[in-house]
Amino acid sequence: MRRGSLHGEIDLNAVTFFSPVQEEIKLIEERMRSQADESHPDLRAALEHLLAAGGKRIRPTLGLLVGNMLDAPLEKLITLGAAVELLHTATLVHDDLIDGSLLRRGMATLNARWSPPATVLTGDFLFARAAKLAAETDHLPLMKLFSETLATIVSGELTQMFSAHGLINRENYYKRIYAKTASLFEMTSRAAAMVSPVDEPEVEAMRDFGYQIGMAFQIVDDILDFNGDQAAVGKPLGSDLLNGLVTLPAIYYAEANPEDPDVLSLPIGGWTHAEHMTRLVENIRASDSSKKAMREAEEHVDRALGKLNVMQPCAEREALENLAKYIVDRKV
Amino acid sequence: MRRGSLHGEIDLNAVTFFSPVQEEIKLIEERMRSQADESHPDLRAALEHLLAAGGKRIRPTLGLLVGNMLDAPLEKLITLGAAVELLHTATLVHDDLIDGSLLRRGMATLNARWSPPATVLTGDFLFARAAKLAAETDHLPLMKLFSETLATIVSGELTQMFSAHGLINRENYYKRIYAKTASLFEMTSRAAAMVSPVDEPEVEAMRDFGYQIGMAFQIVDDILDFNGDQAAVGKPLGSDLLNGLVTLPAIYYAEANPEDPDVLSLPIGGWTHAEHMTRLVENIRASDSSKKAMREAEEHVDRALGKLNVMQPCAEREALENLAKYIVDRKV
């Protein structure tokens, strides 16, 4: 279950939703960069490295598109986008340290270059500056939402670490991907609406829009872990299962093949047998499980698109539609 | 340069400042404990362990005494106290992991019992819940102050890690102990006043009160590292110097003995030679450097007491005076 695995390849769908906010994304990156301005040169260099390795900025783009569509003040959207992306970056820094990952999006992770202590503290620094940026929006409900989302994300990671290995359980899976990914998409979209001159129904519609595309995003990530282009994904196929994480394609497969011995072995530690898991991954790849999982992701995207129908047609609405579609169309 | 090294011994001075808030401290601990209510049992057990190992709660006590003196709503002080103490606890969890410390206040640290990943995430969880509690005060300036203080603390740790080894520099030392310790005392005292029905001069007086006792607290900690009861302190004497951290007693000694070869060796890595540092620690112990450092701590306490003079006499004011005096009188 990777998170934020987008990388820098040109992608026409992506271009269509990034173009309305291209310049504003640069302002957000500038704001992120400035968080280390008064810090030690080594820390500035680390942030620079993380920014360079930084993926497509899909979360800040979501915030900008929603906020621009709803006439939010740009300054607040810039601050919100920088806060969200720094929070996301902080979780990746600690995740990579915890997993011992040496590469992310084809670039060296921080822990590949730095000591664990420096990596822990850099993650903490990014959390701290993200919270400070959230506070700079001067918007109390937004700050509360931000701190709640941070708590949701970290609690989810802990629960996964403590109890998710080998567990074949749909409810647990949905909770996990909500905490891991959808909560931050939901928060971003909702917060952008909260700082806009709109009423509660619009805020709720945008909250749900973010939730739905966030759920779809993680489901697709989990499908790509089985079916993606291995070079582009940058991990062995089925790496989640090899780490004991049972994601939606594996759940569909288990439901259709409850007597498969590899499935039966999962909850009792079978995931630690690499050769069994490689066989299971092959069986899942040969099955229609990923197709079924993709159908679920598409349903989320359809629900997201439904929320946009009530908005006035405009360039941002169109870009949000493209963003939602891109989430299920992407190859990496 | 230890942080928060108080332990549970009975101490008459301490009793006199804890007694007015004894019951309220229990409410704060209850609020802290409840942060893991919906979490995994292992995480609940970890928080329970951290609470049991939790020292004297000097920061929440400071907040309660200031707030009660100034008629703040108790509910906000409970929330503030829990937020501050959880933040403090989070920094200790990551500090102990980074330093590889196995004991704190005579009890096993979290990293002594758990894997590094679980320890990193538990620290993150505590940060997240601290931020959520700060948000629950529903007080925008307090939340901003809280997130700024978190950023100050973490930046200070990073700067120390990157650049403080062997550095003999007063300005750097004062900045370091402000970031490490005084900033949180300052924030606590200031925030308690901010949620009270008082004007800016009182808030500023209480901010400075917290700042002064925070600076004194860390200076005394650093003196105890040289002169404390080794069993009570729980570390080898001079452990800071052995780790390359030059604190105030060492700075006074260096200023008085600029030609001492061990002093000269410090900025060029001399602190890595344990036998030289043991000799230097002995020389510092035999000198009047700690006495000079203590004089500085006492000046901070005097300035703190001066801020209380403008307050109406009451039980809390007296307790705050005792708290300030305790900081320089304590033995551990």
Image (cartoon, coloured by chain):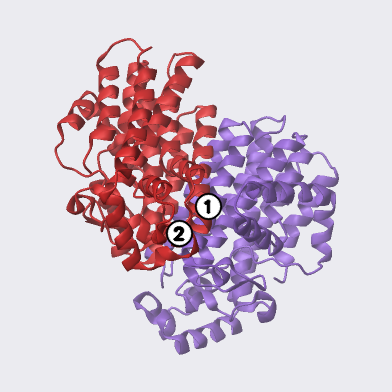
Chain colours: A red, B purple
Type of amino acid under label 2: Leu
Which residue is disc 2 drawn over?
Answer: A264
Q: Is residue B56 above or below residue B271?
A: above
Mark 1 vs mark 2, CA separation in Å = 22 Å
Q: State which chain disc 1 sits on.
A: A
Share a chain, discs 1 and 2?
A: yes
Q: Quadrant of residue A324?
A: top left
User: Pointer 2: residues within 10 angstroms few (<14), some, or many (20+)?
Assistant: some
Q: Residue at x 26, y 52 (%)?
A: A49
A115 or B151: nearer the viewer: A115
Where is residue B169? Give x, y as percent: 44, 66
Which residue is disc 1 drawn over?
Answer: A159
Q: Residue at x 44, y 14 (%)?
A: A197
Q: State which chain disc 2 sits on.
A: A
Type of amino acid under label 1: Thr
Where is residue B128? Give x, y as percent: 53, 46
* In the image: residue A281, left or right of residue B186: left
- Of the two numbered discs 1 and 2 on the same chain, state the one appearing first in sequence: 1
Disc marking residue B25: none
* In the image: residue B183, left or right of residue B324: left
Mark 1 or mark 2, which is nearer to you? Answer: 2
Q: Residue at x 78, y 69 (%)?
A: B9
Q: Is residue A22 above or below residue A103?
A: above
Q: Residue furthest front?
A: A259
